[in-house]
């Protein structure tokens, strides 16, 4: 019987020590980690401001690549929520909800409410994004409250090995993800999502040296062929001519020069400049009053042409243009800046989890033969799924 009392006393002492020591432990814990990237704060913030790219960096998917998830709320910003359920017990189930999204000021901030099966409550994961010199620092901080849950307080002693290891893996994956996104800050341009209808086009696959003069000379020559074929087939432009990039290589540039076409007289009547009022001394109409031939809205779709009725010459081909959704921006300036505009669209798309498809293209809103290269205006498109 004495042995029993000794055993019970030992247990009581262990429990007492456990409780007393547990009381001295913090009732909350936090852990921080960080990475640096040369991508702009805009790219970093947009990539993390929602759950479109979440599977590409968060450690949950490293534990379970087949994690079942349901995303609700907006695609980006506050109230976006991801709920998950894993087939593995150590991953369990839970949710991340974006409850704070602030991209104003020097330090951009994101805050997620975290729900999972681990000890604790009021769990949050916050990120601070700050430009420091030539790099952007991403600081991640996890915080959890244990209250009087003594088991939780003890579990908090190992936070650096549980949550900390996952944070380290996630941040390294995040850095790798940023490396796949063009380092192009698109914050100064307007980008919109548009639907592009299919159109009949005359086009010529072209290759030239990768310099602006060679490209321009090639375009002028090919445009002459396209216009000649249009005239012989009683066709007219159904929109601005396009440059469709196939391969922007080191020494050579492969592209199609294309013209949307329709039967002459089947489209809307072209707009004309208002006549000069009396007393204006016969002044020429302002440049912005002159209608660019064929620059009407692409939403006006002509009846498809019968390919058998089209007589082609030289290397001119007939086909149908891309149909579907695309990201669009407008660029005015030297055509040498077009690769930058394309990469800005690509960076914008990749931060938002858009899937690029087909080929990027530009509409020339001025005739290159009659406009100074520095004053040329383009609609730039990149098709996305």
Image (tube, helix red, strand yellow):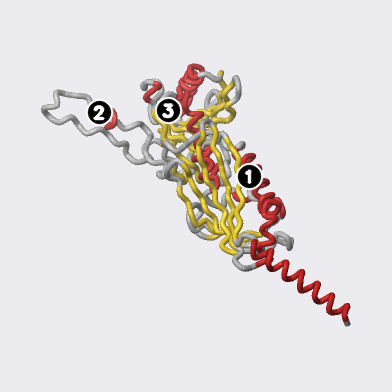
Please give the residue where the numbered disc 3 appears in the rendered image: 231
Quarter of the view holding residue 245: top right
Q: Residues within 10 Å of mark 1 (few under 14, many from 20)?
A: many
Q: Is residue 233 above or below residue 302?
A: above
The extreme left residue here reads 279
| Residue 307 visible in the snapshot | no
User: What residue is rendered at 81% in x and 72% in y?
Assistant: 10
Quarter of the view holding residue 35: top right
Q: Which of the labelled discs sits on residue 229, or is there none?
A: none
Q: Position of residue 229 (x, y in %)?
A: 47, 27
How far apart, in angstroms, are the residues tagged by discs 1 and 2?
55 Å
Please give the residue where the numbered disc 2 appears in the rendered image: 286
Q: Position of residue 250 (x, y in %)?
A: 60, 22
Q: Earlier in the sequence, mark 1 or mark 3?
A: 1
Q: Confirm or deny contact between disc 1 and disc 2 (CB under 8 A).
A: no
Please give the residue where the numbered disc 1 appears in the rendered image: 171
Q: In the structure shown, which secondary structural element does the residue marked by tag 2 occupy?
A: loop
């Amino acid at each position: 019987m004495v042995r029993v009392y000794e055993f019970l006393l030992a247990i009581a002492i262990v429990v007492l020590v456990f409780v007393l020591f547990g009381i001295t432990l913090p009732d909350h814990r936090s852990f921080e980690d960080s990475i640096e990237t040369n991508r702009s704060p805009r790219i970093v913030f947009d990539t993390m401001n929602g759950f479109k790219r979440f599977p590409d960096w968060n450690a949950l998917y490293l534990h379970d690549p087949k994690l079942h998830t349901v995303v609700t709320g907006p695609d980006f910003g506050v109230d976006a929520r991801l709920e998950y359920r894993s087939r593995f017990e150590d991953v369990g189930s839970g949710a991340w909800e974006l409850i704070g999204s602030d991209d104003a000021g020097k330090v951009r901030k994101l805050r997620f409410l975290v729900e999972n099966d681990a000890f604790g409550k009021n769990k949050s994961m916050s990120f601070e994004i700050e430009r420091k010199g030539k790099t952007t620092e991403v600081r991640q901080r996890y915080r959890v409250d244990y209250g009087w849950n003594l088991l939780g307080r003890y579990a908090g002693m190992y936070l650096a090995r549980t949550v900390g290891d996952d944070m380290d893996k996630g941040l390294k994956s995040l850095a790798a993800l940023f490396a796949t996104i063009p380092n192009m800050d698109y914050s100064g341009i307007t980008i919109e999502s548009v639907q592009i209808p299919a159109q009949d086009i005359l086009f010529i696959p072209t290759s030239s040296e990768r310099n602006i003069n060679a490209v321009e000379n090639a375009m002028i020559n090919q445009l002459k062929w396209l216009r000649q074929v249009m005239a012989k087939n009683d066709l007219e432009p159904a929109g601005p001519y396009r440059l469709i990039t196939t391969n922007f290589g080191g020494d050579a540039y492969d592209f199609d020069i294309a013209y949307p076409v329709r039967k002459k007289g089947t489209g809307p009547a072209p707009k004309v400049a208002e006549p000069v009022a009396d007393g204006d001394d016969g002044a020429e109409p302002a440049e912005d009053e002159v209608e660019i031939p064929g620059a009407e809205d692409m939403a006006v779709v002509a009846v498809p042409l019968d390919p058998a009725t089209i007589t082609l010459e030289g290397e001119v081909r007939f086909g149908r243009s891309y149909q579907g959704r695309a990201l669009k921006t407008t660029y005015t300036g030297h055509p040498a800046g077009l690769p930058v505009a394309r990469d800005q669209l690509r960076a914008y798309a990749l931060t938002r989890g858009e899937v690029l498809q087909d080929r990027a293209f530009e509409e020339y809103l001025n005739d290159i033969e009659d406009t100074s290269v520095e004053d040329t205006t383009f609609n730039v498109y990149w098709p996305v799924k």
